Image (cartoon, grey):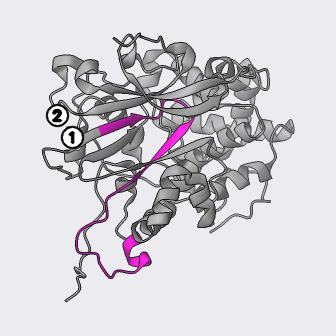
Amino acid sequence: MGGRPNDAPLNLAEHTPADWEVLVDAVSVALGARGLRTTDELRRAMEDMPADDYLALSYYERWARGTEQLLVEKGVLTRDEIDRKMAELEPTWDVS
Amino acid sequence: MRTPAYVKGKLGWIERVHGSFRNPESLAYGGDGMPAQPLYMVGFRQTDLWQTRYSEKPSDTLYVDLYEHWLEGVPST
Amino acid sequence: MSHDHDHVHGDHDVSQHDPEAAERNKVPFYGKRMYAMRDLLIEKGVLTREDIQREIEYMDSRSPANGARLVARAWVSERFKQLLLSDPKAACAELGIDASGLTEFVVLENTEQVHNLVVCTLCSCYPRPILGRPPDWYKSFAYRSRAVVEPRAVMAEFGTSLPDDVEVRVFDSSADVRYLVLPMRPEATDGLSEEELAALVTRDSLIGVTEAKLPTVPATAV
């Protein structure tokens, strides 16, 4: 990323991380504390991401995707399981 | 992979020796990272890294932390 | 409304953070996916809810105030400053700051001749155990790509302009070393207490995109 052509001015706006972003951070670090994830592994998982995704996703979305990639590679979780759990949780996201 | 691309093939100097740490490439794929490798703070002149693209001061410098196995010694003349 | 962290089902909320239902509607696909992963990791015993909560509390308790205290002490004590530069973890320990989460830690002193700036071009490495979460701009592609090739132009966006004869040194945290900048003590700060000095040390000055703030009421001996 260093030195890539980029004329974009910096956006200095800051945001308090949303719940889900805090969770992404916490789960990733907790996995690290348990020896299931290192900075280097996560960097590599993120670098392996298709360029389109890398550029289109926000920082925490990339982080979540990279963490999923590592967990699947290590056989801790499968994509099917995650898909099923997401489907199970889907109704609970509705605001009523 | 763990070397920023913009310093590849560039000539710099050892500014500081950080000590020995585990190999990140091994760690990146879930290995144990052993044996530990020396990690160096390597300095570069910005004008050497970017040539005419660097438009700021010629005395400016940049430092990157690099493992020994990514470095090739150049005999001093 | 705050949630007890023991509240289980339907608890998408992470306690101490905003549990508003409206927030839930803005959770993107990967955010929802992380909740699914969390639930699975807990069900499988890979992580506990307490593991996660501990990390949240750890990050919530870290802030730039830690960095400000280190700098203010270095400004008033030459001995402490030398310790901070030669053995920063020991300096942290002396002030009761827990730096154990850092593999290696280096403090970079700004002087009349040298101004230091820190970036992580490969991702967003930052001394989180000391300073907490990095600002969004630090993690942005714009900062990561531009800071190494046009540091002064980047600093100018923060309103920083350095004298012509200052050397700018950019540090790319490409490995396990984390960097903190020790900004120069501003003018007209004689007689300020350590606490007042710490208030001048902004997070941005610890990254190096700005200098420390000037006191609002100059304090000089009369």
Magenta segment: does it hold C193? Answer: yes
Q: Which residue is mark 1?
A: C152
Q: Is residue C4 magenta?
A: no
* Mark 2 element type: loop
Contact between labelled residues 1 and 2, with CB atoms less than 8 Å apart: yes
Is C205 placed left or right of C126 in the picture?
Answer: left
Q: Please, what is the three-letter code of the amino acid marked with disc 1?
A: Arg
Q: Name above or below for residue C220 compared with residue A59.
A: below
Q: Position of residue C73 (x, y in %)?
A: 46, 68
Residue at x 79% of width, y 37% of height: C41
Question: Residue B57 — which label?
Answer: 2
| Residue C97: image location, x then y, percent | 61, 62
Which chain does the numbered disc 1 sit on? C
Quarter assignment of residue C169 = top left
The three-letter code of the residue at mark 2 reads: Lys
Q: Quadrant of the C terminus of chain C?
A: bottom left
Query: Would residue C70 be seen by someone viewing this image from the given angle?
Result: no
Identity of the residue furthest to the left in this view: C164
> Relative to B62, is A80 above or below?
above
Which chain does tag 2 point to? B
Residue C220 x %, y %: 23, 82
Q: Residue at the spot x=40%, y=16% of the render?
A: B5
Front residue of A12 and B76: B76
